[in-house]
Image (cartoon, rainbow, N blue to C red):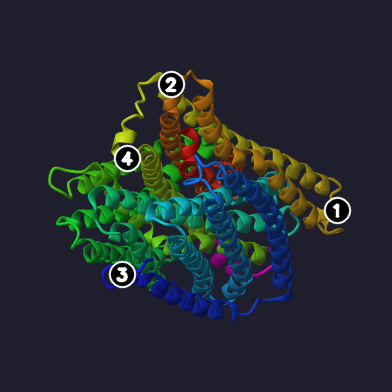
Amino acid sequence: MIEFTHQNFLFVVPVATVFALVVAFIFSREVFSKDKGTAEMQAISDKIEKGAMAYLSRQYKTITAIAIIIAIIIARIGVNPAFSNYLNYKVAIAFILGAGCSMLSGYIGMRVSVSSNVRTSAAAVRSLNEAFKTSFRGGAISGIAVSVLSLTGLFVIFLIYSEWCDTMTHTLHSVVGFAFGASMAALFAQLGGGIYTKAADVGADLVGKVEAGIPEDDPRNPAVIADLVGDNVGDCAGRGADIFESTAAEIIGSMVIGLAVVKELNYSNNFIYLPLVIMALGLIVSIIGIYSVRLKGTTVFKALNSGYYIAVDLAILVVIFSCYHLLHNEIDKWYNFATAGVVGILLSLAVVYITQYYTGNHKPVKTIAKQSESGPATNVIMGLSVGLESTVVPVIFIVFAIILTYLLGYNAVRGGNPILGLYGTAIATVSMLSTSAFILAEDTFGPIADNAGGIVEMSNQSEETRNRTDKLDSVGNTTKALTKGYAMSSAALAAFLLFAAYFEIVGEYNNTSISDEMKHVVIGDPLIFAGGLVGAALVFFFAALAIRAVGTAAGEMVSEVREQFKDGKIMSGEKEPQYERCVDIATQSALRQMVLPALLPILTPVAFGLFYKYALPKCFQHLSPYAVGGLIMVATIVGILMANFLNNGGGAWDNAKKYIEEGNHGGKKSPAHAAAVVGDTIGDPFKDTAGPSIHVLVKLLSTICLVTAVLYL
């Protein structure tokens, strides 16, 4: 039985979640008490909400059906006594709970967004300050609620399973199912939402902006409502599930590494509890950072950065306090783990700066805009170059962080210990995610502001009002890019952490240590190298399927919009656009095309591991878990690079277009602008579909292997 004591500080978890819920309730009353503006605004908002909730309902039915099938398979495998300690009905129940909580996170993000956008539009009529406060507080509700759900869901199931299971080992091995369920649902949500939003966006831009020459969010564009719905299903529902999954998977992975420390070095369970304490206190400091954001006398971007810096500064103090309080009686060099946590936080800050440089109004974006004067070809060439270049510096920082945090943990005891080295990286990963509530608030702020601008445009508000929402939307595009960079860097550390946790389970089965098991992953062995090649190809094939899905769905959308424009009656005002047809096309295309790429990372490692176990000669069958480890390792490396390239390249194309729309290089309707629209259209599936989905893919690969490791042994 787990006791709440002053020494383990676990009581801070329920205290932090209650405090966060109170703050979320206060923000909710503040935002939802505001007026919804004119009747025209409300009518447009109602259409967006109806389309978003209809899509989410249909998507969740698909995810639920797949989750139930997988849970039944897990429970059925557990009937075999050889597997029952690792795969059983307890894991299946945890899997269902993880998937359910992940879907609930997406629903919360969606519901908050569609309720806040029209209120932001109405506030923009009055002032920029009020519009910013409304949109950011709306994002904060989502960020806090999702963080509370992740921490509380995991903590509660951990407490229940600690009573239900006979040992801490079996407890954590069962709770791993929660992370697998969260990752599976998040991948479907992110991928499906990304396909939807970009199909609608591409259709609206290519026909509306380029061919018809009408402004963005013009009410005459039949795809405009589908485009606004897409902002919610992709950037709110999808990202909410993504952050939930990241938090759950990385806390569980850290706890599994902590379990290895306890078993090998005979320390107390405080090494298992520390990640929970850091995340709970991190939730509190994120809320303080959110409260500190003020627009008075500064720009929107500086106001957000100021709040983030406050959250980061406090998070550093929280990590130091937590490591001292839980570990100083256990190990002399407790401060090595505190330092590792600080390194993780500083890595997140560095990635934010790097992403700002490559996707904000700096040299890379301005260079793409300049090249647009020569046409679409040079715009695309420069955008690809910027995206590829943007992978280098983040990887340098990630490599530095992994090496430093491992060495800090390794040297926490005299003579060094590799398990403590892994634990150092685990604490860095959790510390990096400690400010995730603030990051998610920034991310949800983006689509709320984007939707608000669309509502303002469609309801024919004043130019001044549109300028206010444009300022918010411009910042929102950058904050969305920052969130993707943050998610990518955390995925890099998390995947390494989950990779180690996978070998903890292999070592438990073989009665050896993590470090001994990891030594078997020798990339020079042809059979292990083959696994690495499969992992690399998996990432490329997944990205291809995701981008192709957007292209196919966008093609259907373009055909529909052209058909509606063909007789010229919409442009002349003789008839209204049929928005519902475009919404339905985007919904059906997204749901139809998300299934294959989402199942790919679930089926591939399992099929590969079983192939090695049963198809190879007996003298090589013992390599199965290590070949799967090679698959995970190389897929993680390639996934990090690919996600960074797609996210930053797409973000740079998007902001290059907006930079031209501000009046540079000829402004709107110039040849440079037409070229930039083409580049932005290419970048859309990069940054909003394939890139964010790869963040989830690299963690899903590890969590499914955590659950199914026993099958390869």
In the figure, is residue 584 to the left or right of 495? Answer: right
Q: Where is residue 614 in the image (x, y as percent from the top left)?
A: 53, 25
Identify the amino acid type marked 2: Phe
Q: Give the numbered dot on residue 569.
A: 1
In the figure, is residue 545 to the left or right of 302? Answer: right
- Distance from disc 1 to disc 2, alpha carbons, whole Å, reads 70 Å
Q: Nearer the viewer, mark 1 or mark 2?
A: 2
Say whether disc 1 or disc 2 marks the residue closer to the N-terminus.
1
Residue ID for mark 3: 9
Q: Quadrant of the N terminus?
A: bottom left
For label 1, the crowd category at 10 Å Cα-Cα, with few meaning under 14, some 14 to 19 and many 20 or more, is few
What secondary structure is the stretch in magenta mostly built from?
A: helix
Residue ID for mark 4: 514
Identify the amino acid type marked 3: Phe
Say whether disc 4 or disc 2 marks the residue closer to the N-terminus.
4
- Which residue does the image show at 13% across and 43% down from the upper left? 415
Identify the amino acid type marked 1: Lys
